Image: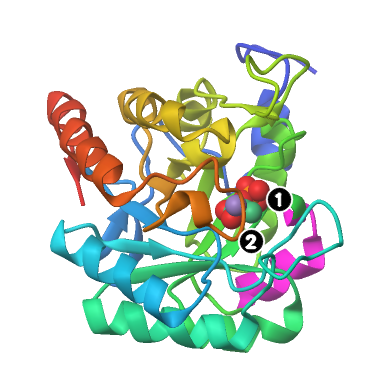
Amino acid sequence: MDNKFPGKDISLDDLKSKIPLCAKKNIKHKSIVKVRNVEFGGNKIPFLAGPNTVENYKMIGKVGKFLKSIKISGLRGGAFKPLTFPYRSKKYYETKLDGLRWLKETKNKYGLIATTEIMELKYLDDICHSTDIIQIGSRNMQNYPLLTECAKTQMPIMLKRHYGSSLRDWLGAAEYILAEGNKNVILCERGVSVPHTHRSSSRFLMDLQVIPAVQEICHLPIISDPSHATFWAPWVESMTLASIAAGADGILIEVHPDPKNAAVDPLQPLNFNQFKTLIQKSKKVAKSINKKIV
Ligand code: PEP
Ligand code: MN
């Protein structure tokens, strides 16, 4: 097969026969995924910010109120959490249906859009009724029955990249969602596994280059998650600004009222002041490329 496309990973033939729905139909074609009044893929850059875990109502309420006060549109928070090891301490709990209820009440109270991760199909209905974007976590990127069932709801879906997957695998997974007639797919880069990560506690490396790589061949919006990629709050600001400069269509980021006491991954969330500063800087970078932070 003649492969004139730059790079070896995705061939011209793949674009035609394996990921035809992901592929750009022509140079200009780019999709906008609309989530209520918030658009991903246009000239606005929505932030989805919040804790790793919806720990309790008071805490998620604080985050919601804060986001509203600085005009940020999106709230994130997990009620179901994949943990690398099966043992949960008193701090490492899942709030499940309670967490979904708190998320819903908070997003409604402050007029935010919200996203949460799905782990099991049995909670699909509850998640659809409590949030606006279904998050498929990196670990489930290739769980095809889960992708297909989520796709059928026609809800917007944020598909995180598995940390070991190529762009070809990732777009193959996105194609499963598009193949169900659901065009509301948002890709999310969250760092990949590599032999060296510059710091012993960070397991992943942010693949900034994948942002233009996706945009070259695929019409779907792509957002960036610097929190999971760096696993280290002091690096989150620079990687967020770099993601915006690289063309990211949105940012998923961990923000916690009291990071050192976060139930999960206390090293990665920003506190409210750090996040405020980051938003001010992000606005400047966005302005330089004619985009706007929302
Ligand atoms: C998350 O966003 O909370 C999460 C678990 O992310 P990932 O699937 O990328 O590890
Ligand atoms: Mn997390």
Mark sitting on residue 254: none
For the record, the magenta segment spans: 140-152
Amino acid type at mark 2: Ile
Q: Which residue is drawn at 53% across and 72% down?
A: 55
**19 in relation to 10, above or below:** below
Q: Do the residues labelled 1 and 2 touch (CB within 8 Å)?
A: yes
Mark 1, residue position: 173
**278 in relation to 202, above or below:** below
Q: Is mark 2 on a helix, strand or loop?
A: helix
Q: Would you say residue 224 is visible in this rendering?
A: yes
Instruction: Give the Cα separation between the discs numbered 1 and 2.
Output: 7 Å
Q: Nearer the viewer, residue 95 or 73?
A: 95
Q: Which of the 4 image quadrants contains residue 210?
A: top right
The image shows residue 39 at horizontal and vertical percentages of 29, 57
Q: What element carries label 1?
A: helix
Amino acid type at mark 1: Ala
